[in-house]
Image (cartoon, rainbow, N blue to C red):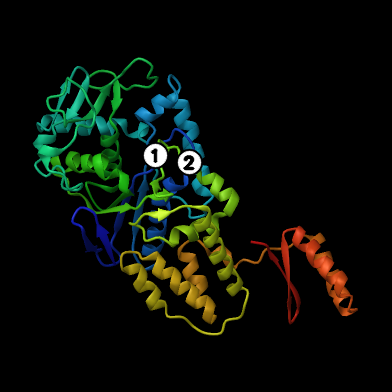
Amino acid sequence: MRLFDTLTRSHVELPHAPGPIRMYFCGPTVYQRIHIGNAVPFVLSMWLKRWLELTGYETSLVINITDINDKIYDAAPGQSASLAERATRWYVEDTDRLGLGRPDVEPTAVETVPDQIQMIEELIAGGFAYESHGDVYYRVRSYPDYGRLSRQKLDEVREQEPNARKEDPRDFALWKANKPGEDTSWESPWGNGRPGWHIECSAMSEKHLGTSFEIHGGGMDLVFPHHENEIAQSRALGHDFARIWMHNGMLSMGGEEMHKSAGNAVLLTEVLDRFGRETVLLFFMTGQWRKPLDFSEATLTAARAQAETLRNALRGETRSSGDWDAFAAALEDDFNTPAALAILHEWARTGALAELRRGLDVFGLASMADRAQAPPEVVTLADARIEARASRDFAEADRLRDEIAAHGWDVRDVAAGYELVPRA
């Protein structure tokens, strides 16, 4: 299998099965419920894990939870810890609804503070970082390859965190001294404070996957400064760190990227309430993972129609067999979900239902083959409709059909009598 690597701008082959394949994807900063765009790296990583395991790989997937961050302090001054705890529960609840399971490990920044302090001490000892009035900064100029991931020249890197106490405007914070209004802090060799955002992920990934692992992922918006800084920190210490960098494309609305700060974010739970998990997952399949994906009423409605087409096919009879190798080839070539989805529709059209069920299961969509049980009152109406048709009272049969529809079900005539199907 090959995947596109942001660092080299090329496709990189994974080692042969069984691997192992160790993966770290950046999770959310928890200060409110996640929006639909935040779900993309979660879904992509869980899908990738499912596919790799199906093809014989041993995998480890780590998705972190950032529960120490300026955004949390700003959102709940004096109560950031309680907000982070609540928002962590919201995140787990909302992503559980996608039905894809959980990562192998979901570390938090809070629980790995000692590991971060140790890493900062090593960076200082190596001359890559320095203390200034209780803060600790990374010396960007000490790492000659800085900017390679984001394609920036070292002398053109823009300032990330303005502070006159820094040696160089480009330097970024590894440790921040405690400030008034911040309700959480930890003891360190530099005084009470808390870690910077970037050191958190270097420490969490290396704690659970080691200093060298196969895949690091996250949204395209994390290329700079977050992932650029992670590379600098870890490789300055001689760690190989991640071999492949997967950056998923962002969701857009009306041509604008979806961001909480832009005020155009739609909560994941709201989309799930309205369209259901199967439509949401199918919507994500329609986009190539590293390209932008348009989120709109039209694109969600189209995904719902595709879901209904596949469900209808699964209610039919098997008429052929499908080419599983073609499906596998699509996913082995940079995890091309739109190509895989086209094959699923071809199997639906030709009646290759065994392969269709197997393919849908890769993406957590095996439930599309489930037949929902209609409530007793709807079954009674359907039985009455059969009797009306037998007595040629078609007006009554039509009335009963409409009443069944009002209950949220469609009745379909089949050789054995009738079939009740939930309305899309």
Dot 1 or dot 2, earlier in sequence: 1
**Percent x, y of residue 69:** 35, 30
Residue marked by disc 2? 91
Q: Please identify the quarter of the rendering in which residue 17 is found.
A: bottom left
105 or 253: nearer the viewer: 253
Q: SS class of the residue under badge 1?
A: loop
Query: Does 153 sit left or right of 301 as displayed?
Result: left
Residue type for callout 2: Tyr
**Percent x, y of residue 44:** 39, 55
Badge 1: residue crowd in 10 Å (few <14, some 14–19, many ≥20): many
284 or 355: nearer the viewer: 284
Q: Residue furthest top?
A: 180
Q: Quadrant of the C terminus?
A: bottom right
Q: Please identify the quarter of the rendering in which residue 396 is found.
A: bottom right
**Percent x, y of residue 147:** 16, 43
Q: SS class of the residue under badge 2?
A: helix
Residue marked by disc 1? 65
The residue lying at 40 percent from left, 65 percent from top is: 337
How far apart, in angstroms, are the residues tagged by discs 1 and 2?
9 Å
Q: Quadrant of the N terminus?
A: bottom left
Query: Does 242 sit left or right of 424 as displayed?
Result: left
- Compared to 397, does 156 lie above or below? above
